[in-house]
Image (spheres, rainbow, N blue to C red):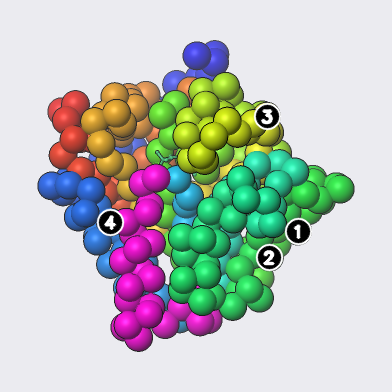
Amino acid sequence: MTNNEVIDSRGAAFGLHLHIVADYAQVSRLAADIVTRIVRETPDAALTLPTGETPRGMYAELVRRIQAGELDFSAVQLFCLDEYFGKGIEDATSLTAWLNDVFLAPANLDRDNVHLMPSQAADPESAASAYERDIEHAGGLKLAVVGLGPNGHVGFNEPGSPRESRTRVIDLTDESRDQNAGYYDGDQAIPDKAMTMGIGTILDADLVVLIVSGSSKAEILKATLEGPITADVPGSFLRTVGERLIAIVDQDAAALLS
Ligand code: GLP
């Protein structure tokens, strides 16, 4: 654990919307329903959506709706949440290639509306600032959907990430690198750095949706929603936005919540 100040152990937790649903299928459907609602309200909304195992079902449902003509994503401005530093969409073992396979390609999204994380920029600092400005020019994020890493990371904001952090390059923990190796077949060397939207970038969204599934996440979900609000568990900062946070979790993940 890093030595970070505890901000609050209870207060800001009140007011968030916590939806405990039966299973993974319902997490996926409810998350897809929220994305659908936001896009119907604001067809050119700027959004960020996560990668990882958890959102697979949500993407499958969104792709189904888009292909059936029930949902029009053609004007949505999609900002990538995170990427390994030095990798990009052309690398089979990148998060953006994963997103492409699972969502961008089957949903036939216009590449001009997909804002890639500038993870290969020669000057990552100024590229990160430009990325933040692009989000602003798109009207700010209407919605940020995030998953929860086993160590409490959101995006790739590893433990120690401050609440006000913005898009930047970050060192990945060995735990996160091991977790991410599981996304790919074979022995993948996961880079030791990533570029991620910051906690502050995510929390500026009009609506933040946290999706969590499975008993392996029960302990970290409890720390996230009921423990101290601290950079040791970056996901705990989500609670600071009160009712702008919707947590959608299944019963297995919620098992330890009081
Ligand atoms: C990954 C990603 C996150 C993701 C989280 C949870 O490392 N960087 O964006 O939300 O960890 O992943 P999963 O859904 O596979 O458990």
Foreground residue among 185 and 44: 185
Q: Is residue 68 rendered magenta in the image? A: yes
- Of label 4 and label 1, which has the lower sequence position? 4
Which disc is residue 28 wearing? 4
- Of label 1 and label 3, which has the lower sequence position? 1
* Residue drawn at 35 percent across, 86 percent down: 69
Q: Position of residue 94 (x, y in %)?
A: 62, 48
Q: Position of residue 10 (x, y in %)?
A: 29, 29
**Badge 3: residue crowd in 10 Å (few <14, some 14–19, many ≥20):** some
Residue 251 lies left or right of residue 97; in this view the side is left
- Of label 2 and label 4, which has the lower sequence position? 4
Between the residue at mark 1 and the residue at mark 2, the CA separation in whole angstroms equals: 6 Å
Which disc is residue 192 wearing? 3
Disc 4: residue Cβ within 8 A of ligand 1's nearest atom? no
Between the residue at mark 1 and the residue at mark 3, the CA separation in whole angstroms equals: 23 Å
Q: Is residue 11 rendered magenta in the image? A: no
Q: Can residue 141 be seen in this snapshot?
A: no
Q: Indicate whether 81 appears above or below 142.
A: above
Amino acid, disc 3: Asp
- Residues at marks 1 and 2 touching, judged by CB atoms closer than 8 Å: yes
| Residue at the farthest bottom position | 69
The residue that label 1 is drawn on is 130
Q: Which region of the structure is painted magenta?
A: 53-76
Foreground residue among 180 and 43: 180
- Residues at marks 2 and 4 touching, judged by CB atoms closer than 8 Å: no
Callout 3: SS: loop
